[in-house]
Image: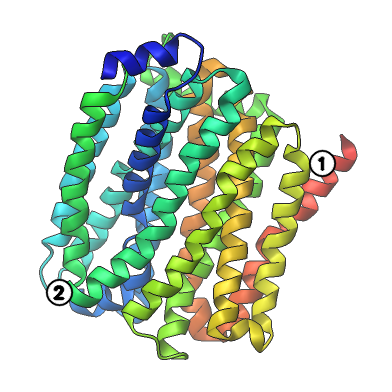
Amino acid sequence: MSASLATSSTSGTSLSRGLVTLLAFCCGAIVANIYYAQPIVGLIAPDLGLSTERASLIVSLTQLGYALGLLLLVPLADLVENRRLMIATAVLSCASLLLAGSSGNGQGELFLGYALLIGFSSVAVQMLIPLAAHLSPEQQRGRVVGNIMGGLLLGILLARPLSSLVADHFGWRAVFLGAAVLMAAIVVLLAVTLPRRVPEHKASYVELMASLGGLLRRYPLLRQRSLYQGLMFATFSLYWTAVPLALATEHGLSQSQIALFALVGAVGAIAAPIAGRLADAGHARQASLLALVLAPLSLLFGLSAPGYSVIGLGLTGVLLDFAVQMNMVIGQREVYALDPASRGRLNAVYMTSIFIGGALGSAVASALYAGYGWNGVALVGAVLPGLALVIFLRVARRA
């Protein structure tokens, strides 16, 4: 199976549909690890002895760990045989999830360390996507990346309702233990089906890491796209960390009802394949403009009475997810086109900036909601992508 997939993809024709579907599933399953805790921090924190103010640290440390993994591990995809590297990180992810699910009462500080490790070890997804781009012909690259990103984004969006539902019926530890079992299955899938890819780049790890700064200096587009999506993802994480608190405390929703609410946000995943096709057709700038306008407007809607209803908050989630995913896919395609031999490192820089933004957004969510309510969350959430929009328009005017 692996040999036939590799032959079809490396021949320059196209990736087989089966391999694209497999990569999309694996991406979704792996990336879900960093989102399981987001809607259930209210259950985890008191059980482990963490205060309400420190509860969002669970989410922010997971995302910070992911950013560190992107920075320190993902560049190795330009240096080390890709399949072996992805399997090693997936095994580490399986072990860290198992440790988190086995945490005892009052072990809050230890669990925060496990959260950091879960994020750090869940970066195989950002090695899979450049691998797919490398194996795809130029005329199909946007569509292939968009389809795989659709699976990744479904993983992001479905992780929240799934964890809420499982935690409500079986306890929060079952979420992490179940994820560990799933990761063990992913390890087997990667080993059996992925084609081997040995990078042509020759350098030491130190030289490889030093080259990241050179890529940032060399490519203004990389800096711009990293900034836009970092601001967008800060709003995304701010919203999805704060909204379960608002739904539980002010709207009286149970964890199962919050799960259904989060499921609605998965509709936004349709943006990924749409964005890929628009980019292939030469409409990347117009699609990015739409995304950067839509994101702040969706948050400002939450300042109104209809916008703060459960239905209104759900509509905000759908529109925000749509905007964030569309801008991410378009940015990823443009960044990959800068230097095919450096896609692993380009992706590392791009995605690290995104998850630094996400970590900052989730870190302030609990305190912002506690101090200023939903209005404070909505205003800050609108300002961040609004700033990205202003910079985007200035760059477009100069160009």
Quarter occupied by the N terminus? top left
Q: Amino acid at mark 1?
A: Val
Q: Which residue is mark 2?
A: 106
The one nearer the camera, 345 or 300, is: 300
User: Which quarter of the image is occupied by the C terminus?
Assistant: top right
Kindly tell me whether residue 49 is visible in this rendering: no
Q: Pinpoint residue 343: horizontal percent, then vertical percent.
A: 51, 24
Residue at mark 2 to residue at mark 1: CA–CA distance? 50 Å
The answer to whether residue 390 is seen in the rendering is: yes
Q: Secondary structure at mark 1?
A: helix
Nearer the observer, 277 or 195: 277
Instruction: Tell me the number on the disc at residue 395.
Output: 1
- The residue lying at 58 percent from left, 36 percent from top is 332
Q: Is residue 285 left or right of residue 335?
A: right
Callout 2–callout 1 Cβ contact below 8 Å = no
- Mark 2 vs mark 1: give the one in front: 1
Label annotation for residue 361: none
Image-based side of 22 in relation to 362, left or right: left
The mark that comes first in sequence, 2 or 1, is 2
Q: Considering only vertical position in the picture, is 285 above or below 316?
A: above
Q: Is residue 279 above or below residue 60?
A: above
Q: Amino acid at mark 2?
A: Gly
Rendered location of residue 30, percent (x, y): 32, 45
Q: Return the residue nearer the eye: 228 or 321.
A: 321
